[in-house]
Image (cartoon, rainbow, N blue to C red):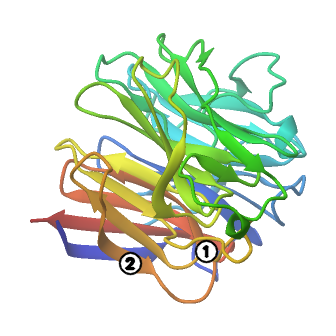
Amino acid sequence: MKVKNSRREFVVSLEERITDSAHASTLLQLHDGSILAAWFGGSWEKDPNVNIYIAKRGTDGVWSAPSLIGGNWHIASWNPVLFRASDDSIILFFKSGAVIPEWKTYIRRSYDEGMTWTEAYELVEGDTSGGRGPVKNKPILLSDGRTIVAPASLERDETWECFVDISRDNGKTWQQSSLVPLRHAGYNIQMVDQPYSKYRCFGKGIIQPTLWEDENGDIHMFTRSTSSAIFTSVSHDKGMTWEQAYDTGLPNNNSGLDLVRTENGKLFLCYNPVGNLPNYYKGPRTPLVIDESDDNGKTWTRLITLEDAPGDYAYPAIIADGNNRLLVTYTYKRETIIFWDIEIGE
């Protein structure tokens, strides 16, 4: 595939932004072609004034002013995720908590294309695990037309682990999968001191998976890691259990990534294609690119470089409109959110 046309724009311009910081965006296309985007914004991540904001890009290509959509409980909100349920409602998931291990997941629903929303309520009432449901990236609706699989993870002090949450009743109740098996090498062991093994993960582990279902009905995940590489795992039973995660060979800087599978089976991965060495914990958040795969994620080629200047360009969200249009949002220098509309073709 190649890029035929593209458009890059600010969701909120630097001059018009209403918060000092903006991060962790999500987006959804509405039935009339408009785009909803949401993100968390405030003084800085973890500040009690951080809340969830939403804006709409109309069919005229103009973004509305952002408005509050989160809980507004004087405790930090995080990582919104937009998703269209099988009953055609729109679900907004988001986290709330002073620190990540204390996260609780809340949702609001819209039955009128984002015009109005229900009051926020807890996704899994009484959850104390650190946040059920999608942690950064969108759920997927399986080919059976009723099963929602949400990519989830846990961030404890020394260990990061992935799982999925599964709903078969349009998001009313959720069943947690097994944790993705991971061979931890140890938090204080340097990668450069060890022989390579694709099954060995250095540092805390893996978080923030992105999912796709292949033509055989298997579910795959790509994950962020502290091991300088994107890790992957596969489920052969609709997400209930997972094979041992391993290094894909694609670099990862311990920052978020996202992926979408189009109707024709092509995969498009948006990520920072850099690793962490020599510091194995975090690498630079530039450049930001989209790669494509036509063999179910085995091999990848570059489609487009979105950003390559010095700075922080990270935490992408990517969706597709059919087979020939990609829509992307991501963080711009922790100050605002960028949107791309990309037309692709042979």
Q: Is residue 155 above or below residue 277?
A: above
- In the rendered structure, the answer to whether residue 30 lies left or right of residue 313 reads left
Give the image quarter of residue 152: top right
- In the rendered structure, the answer to whether residue 166 lies left or right of residue 264 reads right
Q: Which residue is mark 2?
A: 305
| N-terminal label among 2 and 1 | 1
Q: Quadrant of the N terminus?
A: bottom left
Disc marking residue 313: none
Q: Is residue 35 visible?
A: no
Q: Amino acid at mark 1?
A: Arg
Q: Position of residue 138 (x, y in %)?
A: 49, 40
**Residue in view at x 52 percent, y 26 percent:** 242
In the displayed orientation, state which residue is furthest to the left: 346
Give the image quarter of residue 8: bottom left
Q: Is residue 346 above or below residue 56?
A: below
Q: Which residue is mark 1?
A: 285
Residue closest to the eye, 26 or 206: 206
Residue closest to the eye, 63 or 211: 211
Q: Is residue 241 visible?
A: yes
**Residue in view at x 39 percent, y 30 percent:** 219
- Do the numbered discs 2 and 1 sit on residues whose CB atoms are within 8 Å? no
Badge 1 element: loop
Q: Quadrant of the C terminus?
A: bottom left
Report how far apart the C-alphas of labels 2 and 1 lie in the structure: 13 Å
**Residue in view at x 42 percent, y 32 percent:** 140
Q: Is residue 346 above or below residue 313?
A: above
Pointer 1 local density, CA inside 10 Å: few below 14, some 14–19, many at least 20: many
- In the rendered structure, the answer to whether residue 152 lies left or right of residue 243 reads right
Q: Amino acid at mark 2?
A: Thr
Q: Position of residue 187 (x, y in %)?
A: 82, 53
Q: Is residue 89 above or below residue 283?
A: above
